[in-house]
Amino acid sequence: QITLKESGPPLVKPTQTLTLTCTFSGFSLSTSGLGVGWIRQPPGKALEWLALIYWDDDKRYSPSLKTRLTITKDTSKNQVVLTMTNMDPVDTATYFCAHRRLCSSGDCAMFDPWGQGTLVTVSS
Amino acid sequence: QPVLTQPPSASASLGASVTLTCTLSSGYSNYKVDWYQQRPGKGPRFVMRVGTGGIVGSKGDGIPDRFSVLGSGLNRYLTIKNIQEEDESDYHCGADHGSGSNFVGVFGGGTKLTVL
């Protein structure tokens, strides 16, 4: 069974850097074809994809946020870390991490399963 | 990249059926779309993937047979039959733009389903 859990500070100040950790079990990020993504959801608003890292350390970022994001993995700890610089109140959101599997047939879900999310509030 | 459009709300009576719609922007009629269910305070749960030929791959774990999908043109539909109280959720559609490891993820605005 695959599970993922997000952790990080519930409150950050404007201009600070946010560091979030996704700790997972049930798979290894050393396995070919697997990845972990980050998605966020401001209160009452839509989901927004942020970043994605694959088993081979290939990384993808949202074009609108790529200058502020860095995603890394620690395979030995089964963790993926997302950092976001220069935080602003508009970045207040619940941040989710999720499992991704590449399928040559295109039959696989974009993300499945997801973690429960962690709420981050940006305020002075 | 595609834009996915969803109506903000829908409602249906207990035991009735409802169809939710996700519309792709022009030029993306061949795209597959994922449906996700999000109960209050929870992370999204994969329901199933849909293309113009209907379901693609398998349903998500534990998704009842009451859930089905269809695709036509730019529209991707999720139908829920015999609606139960537990179906009251936000439903999001999403698509991955780009093939293989070349990825950009996009989501619709979500539809809040109220069970009357």
Image (cartoon, rainbow, N blue to C red):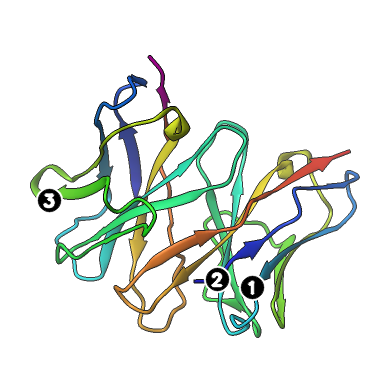
Q: Chain of mark 2?
A: B
Q: Residues within 10 Å of mark 1 (few under 14, many from 20)?
A: some
**Lower position in the chain sequence, tag 2 or tag 1:** 2
Which amino acid, by three-letter code, is at mark 3?
Answer: Thr
Q: Chain of mark 3?
A: A
| Pick the front one: B20 or A50 | A50
Have a look at marks 1 and 3 and say if they share a chain: no
- Residue B2 — which label? 2
- Residue A5 — which label? none
Which amino acid, by three-letter code, is at mark 1?
Answer: Ser
- In terms of secondary structure, what is the magenta stretch mainly? strand
Q: Which residue is mark 3?
A: A75
**Position of B29 relative to A2 (above/below):** below
Would residue B40 be found to the left or right of residue B16 on screen? left
Have a look at marks 3 and 2 and say if they share a chain: no
Say what secondary structure mark 3 lies in. helix
Q: Which residue is mark 1?
A: B25
Q: Indicate whether residue B103 is drawn in magenta.
A: no
Boundaries of the magenta span:
A120-124
Report the residue that reaches farthest toward the left. Answer: A76
Have a look at marks 2 and 1 and say if they share a chain: yes
Say what secondary structure mark 1 lies in. loop
Q: For the residues labelled 3 and 2, say whether their Cβ atoms are less than 8 Å apart.
A: no
**Position of A78 relative to B36 (above/below):** above
| Pick the front one: B31 or A63 | A63
Residue depicted at 79% across the width and 44% down the height: B84
Q: Position of residue B78 (x, y in %)?
A: 72, 64
Would residue B83 be found to the left or right of residue A30 on screen? right
Q: CA distance from mark 3 to mark 2?
A: 33 Å
